[in-house]
Amino acid sequence: MAAANTPGPGNAENAKNAENTGTAENTAGFNTRAIHAGQEPDLTTGAVVPAIYQVSTYKQDGVGGLRGGYEYSRSANPTRTALEECLAALEGGGRGFAFASGLAGQDTVIRALLRPGDHVVVPTDAYGGTYRLLNKVALPWGVEHTVARISDIEAVRAAIRPGQTKIVWVETPTNPLLGIADIATLADVAHEVGALLAVDNTFATPYLQQPLSLGADLVMHSTTKYCGGHSDVVGGAVVTARTVAVAGFEDAQERIAFHQNSMGAIAGPFDAWLVLRGLKTLGIRMDRHCDNAEKVVEFLQGHDAVTAVHYPGLTTHPGHDVATAQMKRYGGMVSFQVAGGEQQAVDVCGATQVWTLGESLGGVESLIEHPARMTHASVRGTQLEVPANLVRLSTGIEDSHDLIEDLARALAKSAN
């Protein structure tokens, strides 16, 4: 396998950033922050796990006399506060916001920071739900977008409309083709024209990549995925940089906070608690996801039925050098194309036993899916249409030999 299994200079530096980002009072390592940030033992009982505050309202000590600032759980809830503080600490951000889903968080960003007449640059390779939100919800509202290959800096520059473009929207790695965007360079490009750089960090997670430390202004997550990690919760998050220096957006944090409360698509207490629990093991889970993905990629590269493997850890991947510079490791997501076309791709997805056929990703169990008919069906016929013979893998933490044997059986069966 032509993959880099040991961190290069860029990986080491980014890993150092990942270990040390945090407030001046909180410079602990990543795993320490994941377990402790926002999660002090309960003062009354000593409980080491935050409580699930399944409550809608709070007793006030006189009119306007709030205890700890809590009055109504749409505005704030102690369990959600714990999650938001932990997310901000892990991303090295100024403030975190937890939502009912990843798309709810993205919608809040759009409503809070954009106005009719504004413009967004969107990746050619992006999650279908994100593009549907921009194309079917934001566009009728008056927010326009242009699609650009986000790995091509000049293509991004060409897509920008000076004075109108307000956000350059990035996924890296992208979904589902695992493209890589140069976060630091794109931050400079966006800031030159007074636009924000917003990075969907769902695939990489804050353990593997720190977009805010590279110049991004916002980080977004579907916490349903790796942050939760157990396929038992739906949620989303937005984390803002400590300082947003782009003129006109200095109050971005306050605007997002206002819209989170006003629009109300917040994470419920139990959902927040589940994500918080998942974050405690994010680092060790991601290491196992990466270990397994590398072994799966090595197997796929040597298989006659596979015509292309998409994984940034491969030295042949066009974004490999950038990924090496800005990621600690290369992640657990893999996609590949098969020689037999769309039908073989569908047959492979239906023939596995250990790999579960299903949408979503980032759980401890391995998932397989056909993007063209499943997660990315909404972009069929657009510039974001994905190859029909593409299979996407979310590599779980099972024993790698079982995952490889299952794929081998499915590929053999699909060829018959």
Image: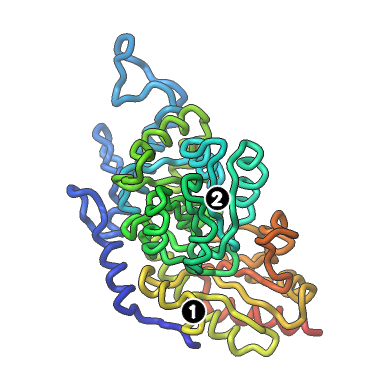
Residue 290 rendering spot, x and y as whole percentages: 45, 72
Q: Is residue 160 left or right of residue 76?
A: right
Counting labels gives: 2
Q: Residue 172: percent from the left, percent from the top?
A: 48, 63
Q: Secondary structure at mark 2?
A: loop
> What x and y, as percent, mark residue 306?
66, 83
Looking at this view, is 184 or 233 the one in front?
Answer: 184
Amino acid carrying mark 2 in the image: Asp
Residue 212 visible in rendering: yes
Coloration of the structure image: rainbow
Callout 1 environment at 10 Å: few (<14), some (14 to 19), or many (20+)? many
As shown in the figure, which amino acid type bears the numbered disc 1? Answer: Glu
- Tell me where residue 68 appears, x and y as whole percent: 29, 26
Q: Work out whether residue 229 can be spotted.
A: no
Q: Which residue is mark 2?
A: 232
Q: CA distance from mark 2 to mark 1?
A: 26 Å
With respect to residue 357, does 311 lie above or below?
Answer: below
Mark closest to the chain's N terminus, 2 or 1: 2
Q: Residue at x 30, y 62 (%)?
A: 18
Determine which residue is flagged by label 1.
294
